């Protein structure tokens, strides 16, 4: 049961990463989602900019794995699951900073376009700009 719970934490963690990167696009359709996405994107960028590799979900996953008889792992979620798939073997601070900048630039661009389009149409501004 603990292994299943740990796997669910992994899915939640991966979903959060996708939300950080792509959430602005969903906020275009569901305006209220910006209230959740902006803090999540800021958190994701902060983790990349500061070099924090251990998200609070990682210790939870490891705790569940250890309770289920597994060893867990000592690295962070990204290092353990994503680096082997999409990042080079040695994640440099420069590349990590670039990832953080990518999150910031993508989200600022999407929200700026949204704001400009809504303003041009005379619609409401994004909810976090009130």
Image: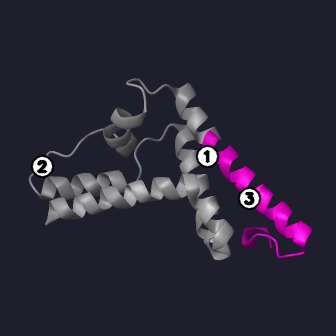
Q: Is residue 77 magenta?
A: no
Give the total number of marks visible in the rendering.
Answer: 3
In the rendered view, does 111 fall on the left or right side of 44?
Answer: right
Asked whether 35 or 27 is in front, the reply is 27
In the rendered view, does 34 fall on the left or right side of 129?
Answer: left
* Mark 3–mark 1 CB contact (< 8 Å): no
Question: Dot 1: what SS?
Answer: helix
Question: Dot 3: what SS?
Answer: helix
Question: Dot 2: what SS?
Answer: loop
- For marks 3 and 2, the one nearer the N-term is 2
Instruction: Write down the quadrant of residue 118 in the picture.
Output: bottom right
Which residue appears at 18% of the width and 54% of the height?
A: 65
Asked whether 35 or 115 is in front, the reply is 115
Which residue corresponds to mark 3? 111
Q: Is residue 61 above or below residue 104?
A: below
Q: Which residues are magenta?
A: 102-130
Q: Residues within 10 Å of mark 1 (few under 14, many from 20)?
A: some
* Mark 3–mark 2 CB contact (< 8 Å): no
**What x and y, as percent, mark residue 27?**
64, 67
Which residue appears at 24% of the width and 59% of the height?
A: 6
Picture quarter with the N terminus? bottom left
Instruction: Write down the quadrant of residue 68 in the picture.
Output: bottom left
Q: Can residue 108 be seen from the camera position used here?
A: yes
Q: Is residue 124 magenta?
A: yes
**What x and y, as percent, mark residue 33?**
61, 71
* Mark 1–mark 2 CB contact (< 8 Å): no
- For marks 3 and 1, the one nearer the N-term is 1
Task: Identify the disc placed on residue 70.
Answer: 2
Which residue corresponds to mark 1? 103
Name the dominant secondary structure of the magenta segment: helix
């Amino acid at each position: 049961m603990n292994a299943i719970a740990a796997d669910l934490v992994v899915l939640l963690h991966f979903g959060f990463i996708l939300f950080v990167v792509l959430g602005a696009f969903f906020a275009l359709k569901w305006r209220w989602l910006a209230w959740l996405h902006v803090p999540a994107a800021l958190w994701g960028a902060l983790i990349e900019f500061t070099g924090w590799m251990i998200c609070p979900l990682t210790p939870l996953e490891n705790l569940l794995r250890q309770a289920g008889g597994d060893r867990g792992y000592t690295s962070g979620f990204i290092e353990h699951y994503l680096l082997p798939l999409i990042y080079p073997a040695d994640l440099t601070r420069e590349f990590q900073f670039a990832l953080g900048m990518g999150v910031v630039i993508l989200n600022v661009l999407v929200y700026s376009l949204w704001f400009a389009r809504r303003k041009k149409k005379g619609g409401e501004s994004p909810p976090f700009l009130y």
